[in-house]
Amino acid sequence: MIWTRSLDISRNKEQGSLNAARKWFSEIMASIASLQELPARCPIAPESEEFTKEVRLLFHGKNQRTYKIFYSINYETPSIGSVQVFHIRHWARKSVDGDELEELMTEVSDREEDI
């Protein structure tokens, strides 16, 4: 699996907030790592209709703490490939639009070319 975008943990003076941020980060990374097995199990994002590349949605969390993880699968062969994560967004935030998603996809692709 190729990690193309890292998440920043905002630092806070309160230890409880820092511990909560670390826990959230660890759990979200575990959800992303779960894509190693059956990455196509998640639904195609409605925003994907505007692109030639299929964008999928992995939901992480429960109830009011759900996050949408936008990603695509790059197949090298029918059974081997890598996952690109483009964006993580809290479910209550405004939906990502096609232009924003395309910008995020381009940014990730450009970073991979530099590697």
Image (spheres, helix red, strand yellow):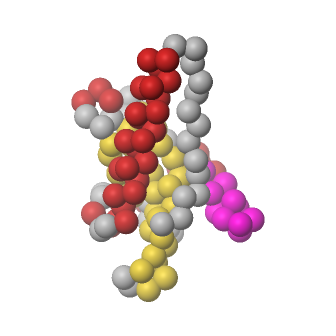
The vertical placement of 57 against 63, above or below, is below
Q: Quadrant of the C terminus?
A: bottom right
Q: Residue furthest left?
A: 63
Range covered by the magenta-colored residues: 104-115
Mainly helix, strand or loop, the magenta region? Answer: helix
Residue at 25% from the left image edge and 34% from the top image edge:
62
51 on left or right of 91: right
The vertical placement of 15 against 37, above or below, is above
Q: Position of residue 59 (x, y in %)?
A: 32, 46
Residue 81 figure quarter: bottom left
Query: Is residue 109 inside the magenta stretch?
Result: yes
Depth check, front residue: 15 or 30: 15
Q: Position of residue 44 (x, y in %)?
A: 35, 59
Residue at 44% from the left image edge and 86% from the top image edge:
77
Q: Position of residue 100 (x, y in %)?
A: 58, 45
Q: Residue furthest front?
A: 15
The vertical placement of 15 against 79, above or below, is above
114 on left or right of 53: right
Q: Position of residue 91 (x, y in %)?
A: 37, 34
Q: Residue furthest top?
A: 14
Q: Is residue 48 visible?
A: no
User: How many numbered markers are drawn?
Assistant: 0
Residue at 43% from the left image edge and 48% from the top image edge:
29
Q: Residue furthest bottom?
A: 77
Residue 78 figure quarter: bottom left
Query: Is residue 3 inside the magenta stretch?
Result: no
The vertical placement of 54 against 68, above or below, is below
Residue at 56% from the left image edge and 42% from the top image edge:
7
Q: Is residue 61 visible?
A: yes
